[in-house]
């Protein structure tokens, strides 16, 4: 089944404790992206990747890192999480030249 | 900077009534996408419009892209309870992979 998976789905952590949210897709998509969703603000893009080893900042990259060492994986790293990074995070992927962007199920992160 | 605004933020309708959400960009867009997010779910891609003045239909949903390619609308005819959710529009910022989403319109349908 074609899908985008994220782990963990829920995470409660404390300020400053490094964490990684994994994202994986099995559709051989070149493009992958991370978004955060906050009430009243819609979806805001954090980082995106056009292909392996090619990443770029979205609108809200501060406090986040990403890497794209393999085509299928695009982890989101929070080196020192802060409470303002409490949010719902979505990973997404699509094929170059295609319209449809597929979203993962989301990761709800709480930073205390 | 470039903004994508969506109105209304909330819409409550009686089942069977029509619903429209509007999306306006501060700059010309090469294309516009629409997504639906059910409560507790993830965004699901509905459609992409590319041409100026384009109109596309999916059953009871009608999507329009403005002549100036700066605005778009989604119209649902005779809403059903299955239409409940938040509808987002999104447009690319440039030729790369940046995508800007509107704030979304949350639709509730009363049976």
Image (cartoon, coloured by chain):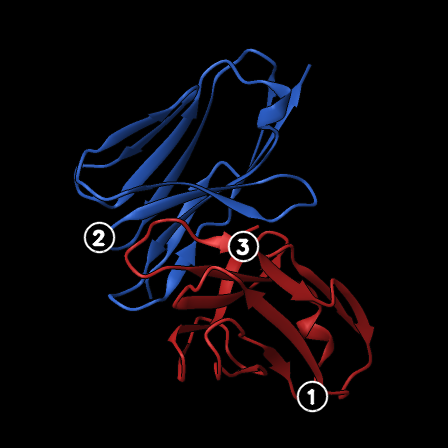
Chain colours: A red, B blue
> Residue at coordinates 64% horizontally, 53% vertically from top-left?
A39
Q: Which residue is mark 1?
A: A80
Q: Position of residue A18 (x, y in %)?
A: 72, 87
Closer to the N terminus: mark 1 or mark 3? Answer: 1
Q: Which residue is mark 2?
A: B28
State whether discs 3 and 2 lie on one chain. no
Foreground residue among A57 and A48: A48
Which label number is shown at residue A103? 3
Q: Position of residue A35 (x, y in %)?
A: 54, 64
* Residue A8 versus residue A57 in the image, above or below: above
**Chain name for mark 2:** B
- Label 1 – label 3 distance at C-alpha: 26 Å
> Residue at coordinates 40% horizontally, 66% vertically from top-left?
A31
- Mark nearest the camera among 1 and 3 is 3
Q: Dot 2: what SS?
A: loop
> Residue lying farthest front?
A1
Q: Dot 1: what SS?
A: loop
* Residue A49 versus residue B77 in the image, above or below: below
């Amino acid at each position: 089944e074609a899908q985008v998976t994220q782990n963990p789905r829920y995470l409660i952590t404390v300020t400053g404790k490094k964490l990684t949210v994994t994202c994986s897709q099995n559709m051989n998509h070149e493009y992958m992206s991370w978004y955060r969703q906050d009430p009243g603000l819609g979806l805001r893009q954090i980082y995106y990747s056009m292909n392996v080893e090619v990443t770029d900042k979205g609108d809200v990259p501060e406090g986040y890192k990403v890497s794209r060492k393999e085509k299928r994986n695009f982890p989101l790293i929070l080196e020192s999480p802060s409470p303002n990074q409490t949010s719902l995070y979505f990973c997404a992927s699509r094929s170059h030249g295609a319209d449809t962007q597929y979203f993962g199920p989301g990761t709800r992160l709480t930073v205390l | 900077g470039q903004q994508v605004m969506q109105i209304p933020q909330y819409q409550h309708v009686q089942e069977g009534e029509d619903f429209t959400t509007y999306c306006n960009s501060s700059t010309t867009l090469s294309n516009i996408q629409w997504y639906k997010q059910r409560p507790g779910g993830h965004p699901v891609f509905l459609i992409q419009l590319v041409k100026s003045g384009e109109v596309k239909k999916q059953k009871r949903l009608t999507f329009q892209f403005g002549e100036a390619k700066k605005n778009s609308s989604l119209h649902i005819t005779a809403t059903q309870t299955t239409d409940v959710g938040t509808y987002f529009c999104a447009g690319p910022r440039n030729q790369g992979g940046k995508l800007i989403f509107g704030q979304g319109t949350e639709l509730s349908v009363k049976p």
